[in-house]
Image (spheres, helix red, strand yellow):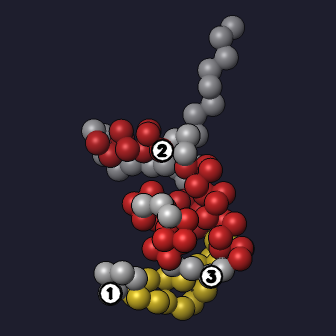
Amino acid sequence: MNAQPELSFYPDAPGYKRGGTSKAAADSMREKAPTLRGLVLRYLAAYSLTADECAEMMQKSVLSIRPRFTELFELGQIADTGTTRRNSSGKMATVWRAV
């Protein structure tokens, strides 16, 4: 019997709301996301950060880091500190910490 690879679903793996480019982007991050989530957790264990601050410290695109925050929150691994700071766009952003 052929063993099928185990398929993970959101939030354990990148999710998407529609097919096409959204699905392609999620699929392309399937292998990278666990590593990025682990790195984000390490930064949040040391510092309380916004997603944008974390991306800057990691020298990664905020577009690859922000979704990892959502996944980690849904997995119960990070929590809102109750504070906010301005991000580069000038909007207020949640400051997160590792649980």
Looking at the picture, which amino acid does disc 3 mark?
A: Ser
Observer-nearest of 30 and 76:
30
Left or right: 91 in relation to 74: left
Q: Residue at label 1?
A: 90
Under circle 2, the secondary element is helix
Count residues near mark 3 (Cα–Cα under 10 Å), then give few for <14, some for 14-19, many for 20+. Answer: some
* Residue depicted at 39% across the width and 48% down the height: 16
Residue 67 percent coordinates (x, y): 47, 60
Under circle 3, the secondary element is loop
Distance from the alpha carbon under mark 1 to that under mark 3: 19 Å
Q: Residue at label 2?
A: 29
Q: Quadrant of residue 91?
A: bottom left
Looking at the picture, which amino acid does disc 2 mark?
A: Met
Looking at the picture, which amino acid does disc 1 mark?
A: Gly
Left or right: 89 in relation to 28: left
The numbered disc on residue 48 is: 3
* Residue depicted at 44% across the width and 38% down the height: 27
Distance from the alpha carbon under mark 2 to that under mark 1: 28 Å
Q: Quadrant of residue 57?
A: bottom right
